[in-house]
Amino acid sequence: MTKCVLVTGGAGFIGSNFIFYLLREHPENLVVCVDKLTYAGNLSTLTPVLQHPGFRFVKLDICDRDAVMKLFDQERPEAVVNFAAESHVDRSIDNPSVFLQTNVIGTSVLMDACRAYDVARFHQVSTDEVYGDLPLDRPALLFTEETPLHASSAYSASKAAADLLVMAYHRTYGLPVTISRCSNNYGPYQFPEKLIPLMIANALNDRPLPVYGQGLNVRDWLYVEDHCRAIDLILQKGRVGEVYNVGGHNEMRNIDIVRLICRELGKPESLITYVTDRKGHDLRYAINPGKIKNELGWQPQTPFGEGIRKTIQWYLANRTWWENILTGQYQRENEDICRGLGVS
Ligand code: NAD
Ligand code: TDX
């Protein structure tokens, strides 16, 4: 029987990778992608599936209550996976309010619709950033699901607020929810404002590589497809009302990532430019993925060395994709594709 899965934020980085994953692994599903097409939404990413019979695109703001209710009435989804968010920490430092609107209010609107239409599962795609940061000099310390929420930026505070709301809807209304908190993702289709694609794009254009502070901050990197598989497993087998941390024990200092990108691209390290540090910059993130491993049998499948080479190759082979972002052409293409689909 066809199962309708509503995926929000599917024109973004992880959401689009998740849609490809779902259509490949569960061809029986109908996937409805809901996206507002903010600056981070790129419909050209979804070109390979736009004509797929099991796929439909809807341009919609998850904060628009009437439109969300109408869509749920039409589609009657069985599961909702919420990727839609403002996702860039630096932007949240400049302008927190849109983060609160989409990440908190948008999540509550979606959950109200899930309640009204008896959706069997609401999955919230959260982040390890809700736990705050870890010190650099205590490598044995890792985030577990019991680590207290302790957000540092407006981005992570808005994601933490959303997580609290999700658990409150579960307790108060019995909404069948799950939450995943993943570490930093990398891979194809990541917007070139985030560390890895920004450094690849700048290096290929022989532009400076802006490293914040001394580049000693540590992130725990996971190939995007491993994250997609974790979410799918949680949807299939995860326990309702539970949080699952997702991460691959792959901690790297920013400077080492940037140096590796220079090496792989044959570019000089003299491109590296140390710039003013991010305000409130989290020192280190590191996930203990024991729960998802023990309960659901999840393990990352792509070692970092392989994933970063695949990612660099992808950016080399898909230069038009990211150059259209740098020139702004992708937003005109979004309008053209919407017109072609009859979507306003
Ligand atoms: P992204 O910025 O690439 O994509 C976000 C998508 O959401 C875009 O397509 C955008 O148009 C859409 N969107 C934004 N506001 C919307 C709204 N009001 N209504 C409908 N659509 C809207 O983000 P990403 O990196 O793919 O992250 C996806 C999710 O995963 C986010 O919730 C983020 O917090 C979480 N996450 C990301 C990472 C990471 O490393 N990128 C790690 C852990 C968790
Ligand atoms: O130009 C840069 N120079 C630099 O040194 C950029 C963009 C980043 N950095 C540093 C800041 C961080 O220490 O690199 C690290 C990674 O930065 P981002 O790519 O902006 O990611 P981060 O802030 O760690 O947050 C990411 O992971 C968790 C995602 O953007 C979030 O959406 C996710 O929740």
Image (tube, rainbow, N blue to C red):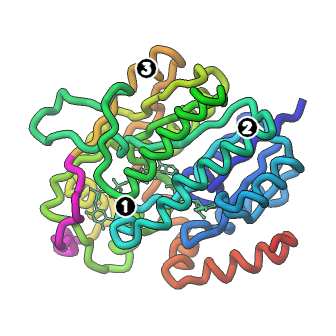
Q: Earlier in the sequence, mark 1 or mark 2?
A: 1
Question: Does the residue tagged 1 have its C-beta within 8 Å of any atom of ligand 2?
Answer: yes
Separation (CA) of disc 1 from disc 2: 31 Å
Q: Which residues are magenta?
A: 268-283
User: Which of 18 and 207 lies nearest the eye of the viewer?
Assistant: 18
Q: Is residue 112 left or right of residue 233?
A: right
Residue 6 percent across, percent down from the top left: 74, 46
Which residue appears at 47% of the width and 38% of the height? 164
What's under tag 1, amino acid-wise? Val
What's under tag 3, amino acid-wise? Lys
Please tell me whether residue 336 is drawn above or below residue 97 in the rendered image. Answer: below
Mark 1 sits on what residue? 89
Mark 2 sits on what residue? 115
Which residue appears at 27% of the width and 54% of the height? 257
User: Which of 74 and 235 lies nearest the eye of the viewer?
Assistant: 74
Residue 306 percent across, percent down from the top left: 41, 43
Which residue appears at 41% of the width and 63% of the height? 197
What's under tag 2, amino acid-wise? Arg
